Amino acid sequence: MRMTFNWKDNDIRMPQFMKARIEEIAKTMNPDMMASGYKSKGSQYDVRPYQSTHNVGGAIMGADRKTSTLNKYLQSWNCHNLFVMDASAYPQNTQYNPTGALGRLGLLVGGGNPQGLPPQPAAAGVNGEANR
Ligand SMILES: Cc1cc2nc3c(=O)[nH]c(=O)nc-3n(C[C@H](O)[C@H](O)[C@H](O)COP(=O)(O)OP(=O)(O)OC[C@H]3O[C@@H](n4cnc5c(N)ncnc54)[C@H](O)[C@@H]3O)c2cc1C
């Protein structure tokens, strides 16, 4: 099996941001010992040490049909009655728990959306251009 997966810049920038905030807080507690482990720039995904069982993506959601598979209601841009309600919709995730937010995304589609049913995205034309 060939797996093509690696961290993107933003996957690294998010934990680096968290690292700075968390270390700041931890230092104010004046601990006897302090250690932290965060991915740094240039980190590569590695199947040998445990890194994450939170691999996501594949049919990502987004605002632009040219760069994403699903709209923000997890609805396929090109096939209106197809909803992909799982973690393949995530455009990014380094390693942290994805499932809570996934439940919320499901609610967007299944009745929890205060605006009602998702609007229909414009159908794609032959060249991928919107018909309306
Ligand atoms: C060991 C482990 C620990 C984890 N711990 C946490 C945690 O603590 N917190 C957290 O937030 N997340 C955790 N996760 C991640 C979490 O389990 C996933 O992110 C989440 O389950 C993804 O949900 P999903 O609906 O996208 O996919 P899944 O839950 O994988 O659901 C996909 C479903 O599709 C079914 N399926 C597949 N192919 C077909 C087919 N051809 N036809 C019909 N059905 C099919 C599968 O049987 C499965 O039921 C953990 C994952 C693992 C592996």
Image (cartoon, helix red, strand yellow):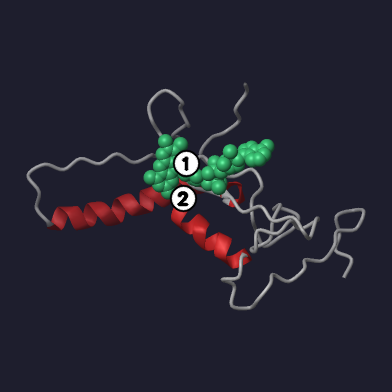
Q: Which residue is mark 1?
A: 54
Quick one: quadrant of the C terminus?
bottom right
* Label 1 CB less than 8 angstroms from ligand 1: yes
Three-letter amino acid code of the residue under disc 1: His
State the image coordinates of residue 59 (x, y, percent, origin top left). Answer: 66, 47
Q: Earlier in the sequence, mark 2 or mark 1?
A: 1
Secondary structure beneath dot 2 equals: loop
Using the image, determine if residue 18 lies above or below residue 132: above
Name which residue lies at 47% across and 41% down. Answer: 54
Q: Is residue 53 visible?
A: no
Name which residue lies at 16% across and 53% down. Answer: 27
* Label 2 CB less than 8 angstroms from ligand 1: yes
Q: Are marks 2 and 1 in contact (CB under 8 Å)?
A: yes
Name which residue lies at 62% across and 23% down. Answer: 2
Q: Which mark is residue 98?
A: 2
Residue reaching furthest to the right = 126
Using the image, determine if residue 54 lies above or below residue 19: above
Three-letter amino acid code of the residue under disc 2: Pro
State the image coordinates of residue 76 (x, y, percent, origin top left). Answer: 74, 56
